[in-house]
Amino acid sequence: MTIKKFQGKTEEEATLKAKQEFGAGTVIMNVKEVKPKGFFKAFKNSTYEVTAAVEENERAVAIKTPEIPKPGKIDISADEDIQIPKPEETKKNDSVAVENMWASLEEKMKNESKKEIAVENNLEEKLESLQNFLEKKLAPEETKEEEPQEVPEDEGFKFMKMIYSILLENEVDEKYVNQIMDEVETVRKNGSSVDHMLSSIYQKMILKFGQPQPIELTESKPKLVFFVGPTGVGKTTTIAKIASRFKVEKGKKVALLTADTYRIAAAEQLRTYANILDTPIKVIYSAEELNDTLQEWKDYDLVLVDTAGLSHKNEEQRNDIKNLISGVSEEYEKEIYLVLSATTKYRDLKEIVDAYKAEFEFKLIFTKLDETSCYGNILNMKLYTGADLSYVTCGQNVPEDIEVFNMQKNVKILLGGK
Ligand SMILES: Nc1nc2c(ncn2[C@@H]2O[C@H](COP(=O)(O)OP(=O)(O)OP(=O)(O)O)[C@@H](O)[C@H]2O)c(=O)[nH]1
Ligand SMILES: [Mg+2]
């Protein structure tokens, strides 16, 4: 695997440079805004630095052959602080095997840094050690040695066990943890360094999450976006956040529709947001009404459609939504976003997506990330459905608490960072 940084005036320009050099297999591992420095900084714009990676076999299809950095050089920048959850937040695992693993990790770090680290046999110290370890491995590398350092086989194995238990603690399905481990095992068997193994896991997990797919406006107007999902997950609040992004931040013409005619208060809730944002809003009862309204709103860029929250077990209600969506005139481009809460149990999430998967092609939005510290279900659902991720929300504040899903940040969290 080769990892390299690319600079550009915009994130897109830097990404394009990476793709031109690395080809179709390019994985964007980190994006950093570089603020101007110096006396004239007020007159300069920020530039962007993209850290990209490519597997050597993928690189064969690159558009042009670039200068290849020395093998084994790890150059991952991590903007976010990596912190390990405090022990009280962490599921305590007293098994002898895990104790041994932590002990060996500390041993490795002691040897690596040639420093005397006082080892106290408590979990907090062990977690801190891991934090330092990961920070060191994920930090930008100016001074790191160029040649990969070969490690004895059992050291790589212990490292893999450590990552294995961190992923399980973060509630990644064991099936997917095993898949990741199988892929990294190949790297370990080739006698790679721990550096290389970690960056390989990082890259493979980023690939598993895939590029997020937020709403893109189209030439044909208006773009129609439906929000469906279980009750109370945050569909209406998320619509208000997205409407504000497009209207206030991007200056687009946005209108709102609600097909939630089951609850009287539902339309009022959306109307309140529409009033604040000064966007039109209508309640619709049928596909015909929906098409008529879209005719009136032909000069709007984006129409967001709220639907009634429903139990995934309620087939009748789901059919109503299905009929509404399938009744939309062909001339409009439409998309469906399935809104899920990050606090829902894995088993329930699987049942929910099973019910929707049978009827719709959708992208995923995860809400309420602020109410959980386990993000494993985001990866689980991505892999279970194969659907693209898009936005995540992390609080009740409209419009602030929403962002496009950040693969790099989430992989770091799943590997024990913060
Ligand atoms: N903590 C937290 N709360 C959220 C988030 N998003 C929405 N909520 C809250 O979740 C509750 C339900 O939000 P709604 O937007 O009404 O959910 P809904 O899916 O439209 O609900 P129904 O229409 O009844 O199915 C509200 O109290 C929101 O403020 C989030 O990201 N974090
Ligand atoms: Mg609602």
Image (tube, grey):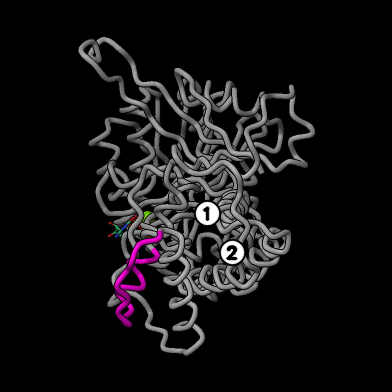
Q: Residues within 10 Å of mark 2 (few under 14, many from 20)?
A: many
Q: Quadrant of the N terminus?
A: top right
Q: Name the amino acid, label 1.
A: Leu
Q: Give the vertical position of 378 relative to 285 (above or below).
A: below
Question: Where residue 396 sits: x, y (%)?
Answer: 27, 53
Question: How many numbered marks appear?
Answer: 2
Q: Please say whether residue 268 is one of the residues in the magenta stretch.
A: no
Q: Which residue occupies 49% across, 78% down? A: 101
Q: Which residue occupies 20% across, 12% down? A: 39
Residue 320 visible, this angle:
no
Query: Which of the 4 image quarters holds residue 154?
Result: bottom right
Q: Name the amino acid, label 2.
A: Val
Residue 352 visible, this angle:
yes
Between residue 309 and residue 42, name the one nearer to us: 42
| Quarter holding ligand 1 | bottom left
Q: Give the vertical position of 5 relative to 418 (above or below).
A: above
The residue tagged with tag 2: helix, strand or loop?
helix
Question: Where residue 187 sits: x, y (%)?
Answer: 69, 58
**Which residues make up the magenta segment?**
114-130
Tell me, for residue 353, which label it has, or none: 2
Q: Quadrant of the C terminus?
A: bottom left
Between residue 132 and residue 274, name the one nearer to us: 132
